[in-house]
Image: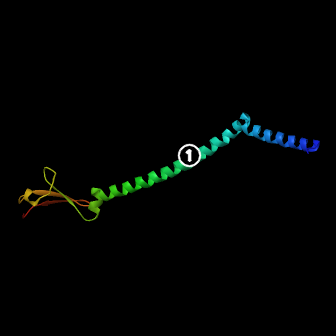
């Protein structure tokens, strides 16, 4: 048996439930939430871009290190040299390319040496 008090209480609960649903679906409430949603997405983009830039920076530094290892100047620093036949300035790759009396320029890590072939 439903009493008037129970009916009132049931109607109040039904009203409160409907009111909550309307508040959730209310366009004004949803529009008020959008700026916060946009801010959250902006923060995520900033964090992700920071991570992406850090990854790209690490990759770039790795490539620079590889290039530095292949640099002719760094190779010279390890004790190697480059010898040129003068006057052509052609890189000397074979001893058979020179004759007694030819002039050579040898590039070292620090400086150069001019020499004359005395024996092949």
Q: What number of labels is visible?
A: 1
Q: Quadrant of residue 104?
A: bottom left
Q: Residues within 10 Å of mark 1 (few under 14, many from 20)?
A: few
Disc 1 secondary structure class: helix
Q: Nearer the viewer, residue 106 or 80?
A: 80
Task: Give the residue drawn at x 13%, y 49%.
Answer: 88
Tell which of 68 and 43 is nearer to you.
Answer: 43
Q: Position of residue 32 (x, y in %)?
A: 71, 38
Q: Residue at x 60, y 44 (%)?
A: 41
Residue 4 % position (x, y): 94, 41
**Residue occupying image coordinates x 67% and y 39%:** 35
Q: Is residue 81 left or right of residue 32?
A: left
Find residue 26 and report its horizontal and vertical position in percent. Answer: 74, 35
Extreme residue toward the right, this view: 4
Q: Nearer the viewer, residue 9 or 66?
A: 9
- 83 relative to 31 in the view: left or right: left
- Quadrant location of the N terminus? top right
Name of the residue lying farthest toward the top: 27
**Would residue 23 be found to the left or right of residue 109 on screen?**
right
Q: Which residue is mark 1?
A: 45
* Relative height, residue 33 to residue 88 (above, below): above
> Going by the picture, which residue comes out furthest to the front?
1
Provide residue 80's location: percent of width, then percent of height. Answer: 23, 63
Q: In the image, is 22 to the left or to the right of 114?
A: right
Q: Is residue 38 above or below residue 56?
A: above
């Amino acid at each position: 048996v439903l009493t008037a008090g129970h009916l009132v209480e049931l109607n109040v609960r039904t009203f409160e439930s409907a009111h909550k649903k309307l508040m959730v679906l209310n366009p004004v409430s949803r529009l008020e939430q959008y700026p916060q949603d946009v801010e959250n997405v902006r923060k995520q983009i900033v964090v992700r871009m920071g991570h992406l830039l850090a990854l790209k920076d690490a990759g770039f530094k790795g490539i620079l290190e590889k290039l530095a290892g292949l640099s002719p100047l760094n190779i010279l620093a390890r004790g190697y040299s480059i010898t040129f036949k003068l006057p052509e300035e052609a890189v000397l790759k074979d001893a058979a390319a020179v004759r007694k009396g030819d002039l050579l320029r040898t590039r070292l890590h620090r400086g150069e040496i001019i020499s004359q072939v005395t024996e092949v």
